[in-house]
């Protein structure tokens, strides 16, 4: 169990630029989740996948946000035309979809700063 | 809609003391799961303890235990014999099955030497 891996750890970019984050889940986990966490707040759900299927998207996920999990393994989260309000920690989590409802395991997150 | 409320933004206790963090929630589901996650400064979120709503017995993990009151929709976390390494943000969270987690605002816990 190597844990959930996120890349990069930090991203600084200018307003209006596009950014892409990557998440590698724990290998045997078929569910993958993205959350956004602003300073001093709890994480907010963005979207989740079961294998390659995107099963739910939050209304927080505007049309500037897109997430993919093309082969049911790693996932990418892209933000187009970044805005100041996109500055946050983006967390990825994974879990297995068995009958016992295994808990979600989180990565270290990607901290996005918009200049 | 599911909501989770943590009414204590910050708490501080001395090492070795016992501390209780409060959490209330709202859901229309009958089957759901409750969690406490810990997020140390600049480190990843880790699971502390979880409770299945259909189980009446309160969950316990070493020094951590919960008081689950289903009718009152209350889910508090008790940390016994607190240690310096318990200093962290603590988040209460709710989920319906293996789906998204809904988090509270968090409680910043400081353990003082």
Image (spheres, coloured by chain):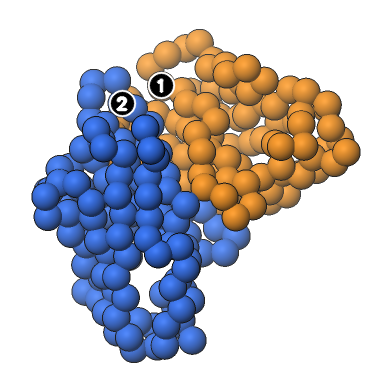
Which residue lies at the image location 76% right of the left edge and 29% below the top edge? B82
Q: Secondary structure at mark 1?
A: strand
Q: Which residue is mark 1?
A: B52
Q: Is residue B54 above or below residue A61?
A: above
- For residue B102, say whether it is visible: no
User: Which chain letter goes with mark 2?
Assistant: A
Which residue lies at the image location 61% right of the left edge and 21% below the top edge? B65
Residue B57 appears left or right of A95: right
Give percent across and percent down for residue B104.
52, 47
Q: Are marks 2 and 1 in contact (CB under 8 Å)?
A: yes
Give percent across and percent down for residue B54.
38, 17
Quarter-of-image position of residue B69? top right
Residue A38 appears left or right of A69: right
Which color is chain A depicted in?
A: blue
- In the picture, one chain is orange; tell me its letter: B
Which residue lies at the image location 86% right of the left edge and 35% below the top edge? B14
Question: Are tags 2 and 1 found on a single chain?
Answer: no
Would you call the spot at circle 2 few (<14 residues within 10 Å), some (14-19), or many (20 or more)? some
Q: Which residue is mark 2?
A: A101
* In front of the other: A105 or B59: A105
């Amino acid at each position: 169990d190597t844990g959930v891996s996120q890349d990069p750890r930090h991203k600084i970019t200018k307003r209006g630029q596009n950014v892409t984050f990557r998440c590698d889940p724990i290998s045997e986990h078929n569910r993958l989740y993205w959350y956004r966490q602003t300073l001093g707040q709890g994480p907010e759900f963005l979207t989740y996948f079961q294998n390659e299927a995107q099963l739910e998207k939050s209304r927080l996920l505007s049309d500037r946000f897109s997430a993919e999990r093309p082969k049911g393994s790693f996932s990418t989260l892209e933000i187009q035309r970044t805005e100041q309000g996109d500055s946050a920690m983006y967390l990825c989590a994974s879990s297995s979809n068995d009958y016992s409802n295994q808990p979600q395991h989180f990565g270290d997150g990607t901290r996005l700063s918009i200049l | 809609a599911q909501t989770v409320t943590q009414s204590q933004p910050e708490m501080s206790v001395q090492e070795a003391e016992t501390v209780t963090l409060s959490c209330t929630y709202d859901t229309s589901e009958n089957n759901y799961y409750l969690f406490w996650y810990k997020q140390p400064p600049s480190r990843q979120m880790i699971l502390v303890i979880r409770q299945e709503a259909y189980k009446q017995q309160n969950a316990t993990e070493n020094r951590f235990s919960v008081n689950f009151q289903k009718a009152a929709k209350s889910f508090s976390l008790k940390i016994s014999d607190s240690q310096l390494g318990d200093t962290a943000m603590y988040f209460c969270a709710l989920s319906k099955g293996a789906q998204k987690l809904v988090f509270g605002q968090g409680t910043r816990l400081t353990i003082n030497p």
